[in-house]
Image (cartoon, coloured by chain):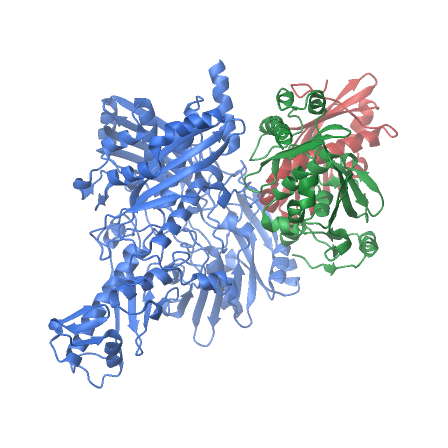
Chain colours: A blue, B green, C red
Amino acid sequence: MTDMSIGRAVKRTEDLRFITGKGHYLDDFSRPHQTYAAFVRSPHAHAEIKKINKTKALKVPGVVAVLTGDELAADKIGTLICGWVIKGKDGSPHKAPPHPALATKKVRYVGDHVAVVIGETLDAAKDGAEAVEVEYRTLPAAVDTASAHKPGQPQLHAEAPNNLCYDWEIGDRAKVDAAFSGAAHAVKLQFVNNRLVPNAIEPRAALADYDTGSGEFTLYTTSQNPHVARLVLSAFIGIAPEHKLRVIAPDVGGGFGSKIFIYAEETVALWAARKIGRPVKWTAERSESFVSDAHGRDHVTTAELATDKDGKFLAMRVNTVANLGAYLSTFASAVPTYLYATLLAGQYKTPLIYCDVQGVFTNTTPVDAYRGAGRPEATYVVERLVEEMAAKLKIAPDELRRRNFVQANEFPYTTPVIHQYDCGDFQRAQREALRVADVAGFAQRKADAKKRGKLRGLGYSSYIEACGIAPSAAVGSLGGGVGLWESATIRFNPTGNVSIHVGTHSHGQSHQTTFAQVVADRLGVPFESVEIVEGDTARTPFGMGTYGSRSAAVGLSAVSKAADKIVEKGKKIAGHLLEAAPQDIEFRDGKFRVMGTDKEVGIAQVAFAAYVPHNYPKDLEPGFEETAFYDPLNFSFPAGTHVAEVEIDPETGTTEIVNYSAVDDFGTIINPMIVEGQVHGGIVQGVGQALLEGAVYDADGQLASGSYMDYTMPRADNVPSFKVETIVVPSPLNPLGVKGCGEAGAIAAPAAVMNAVHDALRAVGVDKVEMPATPHRVWSAIRNAKKKAAK
Amino acid sequence: MYEFEYQKPKTLAAAADVLKKKKDAKLMAGGMTLIPTLKLRLAKLSHVVDLAGMKDLVGIKATKAGVTIGAMTTHGAVAASAAVKKAIPALAHLADGIGDPAVRNRGTIGGSISNNDPAADYPAGLVGLGATVVTTQRKIPADKFFLGMFETALKRGEIVKAVEFPIPKRAAYMKFPNPASRYAIVGVFVAETADGVRVAVTGAGGCVFRVPEMEAALAKKFAPESVVGVSIPTDGLNEDIHASAEYRAHLVTVMAKRAVAAAIGG
Amino acid sequence: MEIKGAYRIAATREQVWAALNDPEILKKCLPGCEKLEREGDNAFTATIKTKVGPVSARFSGAVTLQDLDPPNAYRIVGEGKGGVAGFAKGGARVTLRDDAGATVLQYDAEAKVGGKLAQIGSRLILGTARKLADDFFKKFSETVAPGTAAEKVALDAEGQAS
């Protein structure tokens, strides 16, 4: 093991360029004769477009073109797609109304794209956009999630009566109902899973170029998955044949899911570039990002849990109305169904689970996958129910969990909601978490807080997530339109250094470091000699990109497989060089050795021989490059227990997180420092959801929290120093035993924090506070409880 | 941003001249509100008159009588000033809580009070301490300077040069920040001065205001419990997605109580 | 959002009512009103330049008078587009009542904005609307009864002028 091996806290090699301003983000790219795009966006949540008058805009100096949805349609550019078809209770496919990149007859949310103005300069484009006259006939808006599908609401799409996209279910309702009617205890909760705005630090952007000579398009874009973008833009939207479209996603400053999707802006930029014969660049301003990046979550849920007299879980029953926004975004349909309800078993042996989900359209920004995507929502349902049940039964919440955990010797364990958990040790993670969080000392800390006039609470979140998405056959059987395998090419150069070309994409996940660690470890080459190539469809094999904590579990499995192939080929070359049979060659620490001898040759020499094959096996191809595709056998299941401890100032309603401890099982860990960083970031986003962040629409569909004046991003002073530890139960299902760590914090934290908040507030008679538990909400809840008690 | 002419005059007279002659000219101090507004195209100006570089307007002078802070002195400089910390620690504390480090390193006291954002911190400090605003034309007591939401007594072409703060016997500022913007949802400045007790509230209403009932109660007894029973009416208080008028009214009392405690404790 | 207020105006109810229907007076009193031209019986086109702190926006649109009940009450409604800023809509129910030789004017207003103003300025909407409404009715009071200072009337718990 060297200092750069798997398991070492190697410092991120990408940091130097990021910190010194040498990264190449999208806005750093320009093309000769480039123009700029500015979108005319709807100020109304719901309106008919009566007329678009371009005349004034076209007269604005520097305006090159003004383009509308009618022209887009006339050029036979397809509408944006949703890549996952959900089948409803009655077997019918979900309703996917047309989602034009530029609106034609109607606008359906504030920020919807009405026209694009192309200018010689950005200012000219903006001046032009202001001069486009759009005549609207405003319509009443459907904004509220819970009631959007009820009769009498304003209708968004003729194709989706009652704004219903689908009414989907999982589980056996009759059996679950029967279990409830015979149960000793039941709790029922109703809550909102708040809508979040992703807020990646780099706003979305696109730079589209069309080469009239070759007929080739090049799109630079802020994508988490450039090959998927290329596939969708060519096969479905019809911009160009796939081989004539190159998509480049350079350094990308954060995604959290919001850069998976194929949006209107890049579609329009490509189309406009061809139309005007010049490159077109668009970079979102923060105000645009707030209304046009797909939002996350937005559920209204009723959830029930039934137990026997000892607190053994018997059944769970959940109804969720999921707000999908105005149109179906790329993977929107799957998030509140297969990424959500399939995790409702949590870490527990609940034998019967039923969940039905109504996906609804509203006059709001489309909602899609956001860090955790479905799993934070599921964890919130399960862990809030468990905590409330514990309170009801007067059983310590950690004890109630232990009574119901899937035990370490019960894997593989098949839940009643599709998944088969491969491995885990929930009890050990909880035990470690109790130690790290010093739960034993909590009672004293609570008593001390009380003396200071503070309400102290402790909350657990024992979460499980399905990561490493995903086995293609499973995805296909559930309605997904793509395979979710991954790819890697390992290319040795004649001088012995190595380029790794992968289909994943790092936008904060540190692939440059961790992937190099794995390759250096597996092939015994110096860490510094490994280069990771990502984010360019012309330079990398087809891959599905990075999301769902899949880069390590799926992407590195492909790398690992490709490394196996390199070793196999290397043995043949080395055998020839060492005059031994390939099966007598062993490979270790970068050297091929004839077993039982000291005859050996380094992998760099083997590489040189492969490219300068003067002395080379006759039946072997020259070159030292191997590609592997890896389709996972199953999801991976990171799990763990997080413990949050809060103090609430009852006078102002302010919640302070005073302690936060996490013990996670991510399987094999490649770089503990980077894992810790991922966990920190995830927890902070989870804390954001629990206490700070929330997109607020007014009744007319205006986004009232549309800037950092009103949308509360978590900051360093909102969180304590985290205590993060791991246990390692390697996944038996992939070559490295990794599970994924990118989303765990965001999945676990909201429930842990909110359980702590409810624990603290139980003392003053408060039974419910919604997320985000802002000071105003907490204060109001305390005051209402006091009023109620006084009556 | 729409196009405008950028000017950086060398003298206040020259700056005032542009403001008087050009209808759509605007003064820029730190630019912490103006620049974002321009970037959003929510203002169209003919001229931006930048006061940066007027060294005479930068600096803190402390005497036995009081502290004078130049209009172009940044919040960061006030927060870090040993002289302010010694003479009026509450003022240094106030400055230290404005915005974030970037804002504190650019934003200025003159810019802040001339803008008179209803949730800005400085108006509470000025009114709470009974400060005097020194302009190119006159001296204006803080009580007469802040007229309403984004409205001040400044006339066209009149420029703030400095603010003179008398030294209070004791004072403190307590702010309940908007969690997103860190502006004040409610900020209460309490001071026991030579001329009596002053309680100034920012963030709660359209403009900074005093609470005479609290001042009277504190004049009798300068103790936290004196204000506990005093609540302000919700009428006319701000309401937004972060706080109802009722919550703001409640916070005024809580912050006043804590400010008194801090003033005594400090 | 409650935006209510009342003024006591030293004029008869008929005089006040006439003024409420006089576009010249309305134009003079509407804060930032640059243009108010009659389009129909009770309809006007208008341009209003609104300034809130550093933000300024010019709204072009229509002002209409509705639910007329002379000389007791009406509703004045405005709606305008403000270009890049978005749009604004506002209205006020105005009622008049005799009060010892003078008239008490009470208003109950509402305001909505959309687009960029709503997105970034939500904290200021109520305050701005209150101020604009109050500025208008204050100036109106002073215009209808020249030489007198506007006399604000307190509202009781039910929101009625006492």
Q: In percent of the image, x 23 and y 24: which residue is there?
A: A308
Drawn side of residue A42 relative to residue A676, left or right: right
Q: In percent of the image, x 26 and y 34: which residue is there?
A: A353
Q: Horizontal and vertical percent for residue A160? A: 40, 42
Drawn side of residue A655 relative to residue A309, left or right: right
Q: Which quarter of the figure is the N terminus of chain A placed in?
A: bottom left
Q: Horizontal and vertical percent for residue C129? A: 67, 35
Q: Which image quarter: residue A177?
A: top left
Nearest the viewer among A478 and A600 is: A600
Q: Is residue C158 above or below residue A627?
A: above
Extreme right residue here? C147
Drawn side of residue A258 relative to residue C132, left or right: left
Q: Horizontal and vertical percent for residue A721? A: 43, 43
Q: Horizontal and vertical percent for residue B122? A: 69, 40
Q: Is residue A476 above or below residue A274?
A: above
Can you see residue B27? yes
Nearest the viewer among B1 and B222 is: B222
Drawn side of residue C27 relative to residue A184, left or right: right
Can you see residue C68? no
Nearest the viewer among B64 and C43 is: B64
Nearest the viewer among A309 and A197 is: A309
Extreme bottom residue here? A614
